[in-house]
Amino acid sequence: MTDTAASPVGPLVTGAEIARLAGVTRAAVSNWRRRYDDFPAPAGGAANSPLYALAEVQEWLDRQRKGQEVSPEVELWQAMRAAYGDQMVTGLADVAEALAGGGGAGLPDGVAARVRGLARTGTPVDLVNGLTERFTDSARRAGSDQVTPERVVRAVCHFAPELPGDATVFDPACGIGVLLLSVASGAGTRCRGQEADADSARFAQLRADLLGRSEVRVEVGDSLRADAWPDLKADLVVCDPPAGVTEWGREELLLDARWELGTPSKAEGELAWLQHAYAHTRPGGHVLMVMPASVAYRKAGRRIRSELVRRGIVRQVIALPPGTATSHALPVHLWCLRRPESPAGADANRAVRMVDLTGNSPDASLEPRPDQVADVPLIELLDDTVDLTPGSHLRSRHRDYPAEYAALRGELEERIHRLAALLPALAEGAGPGSLDSATTSLADLARAGLVTYDGPEPVSASEQLDTDYLRGFLRSPLNTRRSTSASGTYRLDGRGSRVPRMSIDEQRRYGAAFRALSAYEEDVREVGELSRRIAEIAREGLAMGALAPEE
């Protein structure tokens, strides 16, 4: 949602916020807009996302007896939106600073008064948590990537390893700290973060202070270009990095020591973030990275993926359900890495666990079914593409090769038996060339109105001409030679192609034979494709051990 700046009509609200004010669904608000002529007109926003003056909406709801009393928290939120517009993170940080004892001297008057009122009746923790929840909900509905989506946070927390009580957790692109503080929820866990946006970093630190999380420290800066934690080695690094960013600083970082798995290309910024995270893990430490699905197979990242696999660093790749990332429709993976304890890698992973949850609802359980999991040996991944897409490896492992092979073999036997029956019964004719004496050109048939065209193929337009007879003779070797150029290109030549003159009964006899031959040729092509599939399944099944030769 695009908020407007301070407006002469006061704070503005969206249709969803009107629904929350009135205690109804968003569909009910849309219905009111259509049914009631006196429903307030939009005071801002765009055609597909209008904004309404809060005062006008409240007056209309009271008049229609549909409203509920606006809570002080809602009034504060609307006042902040009117004052800060698109810079709501700045507003959150300013309010948090005031609640943390900063006095609130920099707050706009309407916001400051409401903050002081709420601080007298509630706790700063409840207020800042409520504002955070409203901001994340607003970002989700607007499709913004300012905040890691709730479903992604849930997935990272679910697949995160169990940590010791004195563990260190690091997020190098922490935003307002939602993912970092959710994963490191245990008392005593040291949290370290960095964020390029100064207001987001300020709010993350202030919120942690208000929550009593004295072990949290968030620094400002671009983690790739200006690492604020060069000596940090964490037990767990979590990160939802910026996706699709090509200007991540490759040229100035070409010789950086963090690229121990290979220098990422300009298009592979996500793999730069992954190696930055890996560089900040201690031996035995873990990394959980939220990644676009395309990073698992893009050609530019093959070398780095190969090193991740070869060294046994990749522990698990999870393809999350569609809709997990609410800011876009792209599929999302969760990559789980582990740094081996010893330099020799004696404890490195010997297989990668592939988990494919793409068939699940985004709000369903994240525990995979047995058919959604496969442990893939490293040697199977180290091919020309090094594809880490879970679905690519699960499909072959959960196929029923014996049943599929038996079914296809039975179908092939049936089709082969049918082939002979499709061939027409043909007797000896009058001899080669016997039909060449009395012929008619296709051009003459067309001029006489006996032929029309269905695309490039001629079709009979008269009861005196059989279409199958016509097409059969036009495909004869003689007419094919007439219609083929010196370069070998075939194109039907309406001027040169000729067909023998026959009665309609004779035409139909020949037409039936040509029709049967066409059906036979089609079946032969299908049998060929079926034969190819059987050979492919048999070869793959034998190589994998799913099939074995009979004794």
Image (cartoon, rainbow, N blue to C red):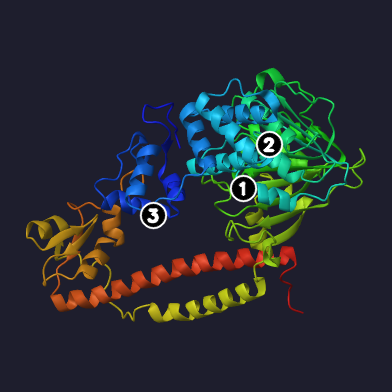
Is 45 placed above or below 141 here? Answer: above
Q: Indicate which disc, 2 or 1, sits on the residue closer to the N terminus.
A: 1
Image spot of residue 135 (x, y percent): 56, 39
Instruction: Give left or right: position of 442 versus 12.
Output: left
Q: Nearer the viewer, residue 75 or 249?
A: 75
Q: Quadrant of residue 100?
A: top right
Q: Residue 311: give x, y in percent of width and height.
A: 82, 42
Q: Nearer the viewer, mark 1 or mark 3?
A: 3
Q: Going 49% across and 77% down the picture, which residue do you hit?
A: 416
Tag 1 secondary structure: helix
Determine which residue is flagged by label 1: 150
* Numbered label attached to residue 27: 3
Mark 2 is surrounded, within 10 Å at the Cα level, by few (under 14), some (14 to 19) or many (20 or more) other residues, namely: many
Tell me which amino acid carries mark 1: Glu
Instruction: Give residue 484's position: percent from left, percent from top.
Output: 30, 49
Residues at marks 3 and 2, CA–CA distance in whole angstroms: 33 Å
Mark 2 — residue? 177
The number of discs equals 3
Please rate how many residues cluster around mark 1, counting C-alpha atoms within 10 Å: few if below 14, some from 14 to 19, many from 20: some
Residue located 68% across and 66% down the image: 371
Q: Is residue 222 visible?
A: no
Q: Name which of mark 1 and mark 3 comes first in the sequence.
A: 3
In the displayed structure, would residue 228 be above or below residue 168? above
Q: Amino acid at mark 3?
A: Ala
**What secondary structure is found at the residue carrying circle 2?**
loop
Instruction: Tell me the residue at 70%/21% (across/down).
Output: 225
